[in-house]
Image (cartoon, grey):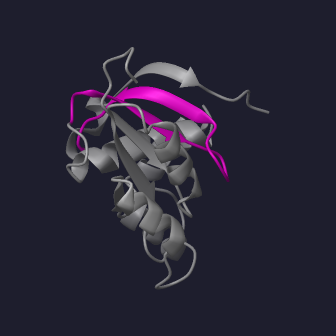
Amino acid sequence: VAEGGIDHVVVATTTGDTGVRFMEALQEADARLICVTHHMGFREPNQLELEPMFSTQLREGGAHILTMSHALSGVARSISKKFGGTSTTEMIAHTLRMFGQGMKVCVEIAVMAADAGAIPAGKDVICVGGSGRGADTAVVVRAAHMNAFFDTTIREILCWPKLP
């Protein structure tokens, strides 16, 4: 964080556990932590997967918790589920998954955080995502807002798992 002059770290966290681990690791760093959760109802209607204990720890530790619709699914996924086929948004998501689920997540949470005003668009941030549980991918991203999605750039791959 200090080496690259980065002052925002965006982490995907479902239950909050990964967010708390990053908060602890970044205690001495001069960086703002943004924890992006699944949206309400992702797995079950009216349910949030973020565990209250972790939510409290994150808030008390100064982390920003961001819960919103996913940039690369949202309404498009609902249409595909209801009527079949696929959308251009889902095609973008599937293309990013060719580099691993974590890479797709990193790009997605960068755009979501920019749209929410949690990070500045056009500035390098570190984004961390994973495949399933935990974090396995970290990249430096220069995020753009959703309405300028293709201005988003992956500036550096810091950590990336070998794909099967």
State which quadrant residue 147 falls in.
Answer: top left
Q: Quadrant of the N terminus?
A: top left
Residue 102 on image: x %, y %: 58, 40
Q: Which residue does the image show at 23% across and 50% down from the upper left? A: 115
Q: Is residue 114 above or below residue 133?
A: above
Left or right: residue 31 versus residue 88 is left
Left or right: residue 28 versus residue 129 is left
State which quadrant residue 144 falls in.
Answer: top left
Left or right: residue 119 versus residue 140 is left
Q: Nearer the viewer, residue 11 or 144?
A: 11
Q: Nearer the viewer, residue 65 or 63?
A: 63
Residue 51 on image: x %, y %: 54, 71
Count every numbered label the image shows and give the total: 0
Q: Judge whether residue 135 is colored magenta.
A: yes
Q: Which residue does the image show at 52% across and 21% down from the upper left? A: 157
Q: Does the rendering let one see residue 155?
A: yes
Q: Judge whether residue 23 is colored magenta.
A: no
Q: Looking at this rendering, what residue extends furthest in the right direction?
A: 164
Which region shows up in magenta? 121-145
Q: Nearer the viewer, residue 71 or 78?
A: 71
Residue 125 on image: x %, y %: 34, 30
Q: Quadrant of the C terminus?
A: top right
Q: Which residue does the image show at 50% across and 51% down from the upper left? A: 19
Residue 122 on image: x %, y %: 21, 29
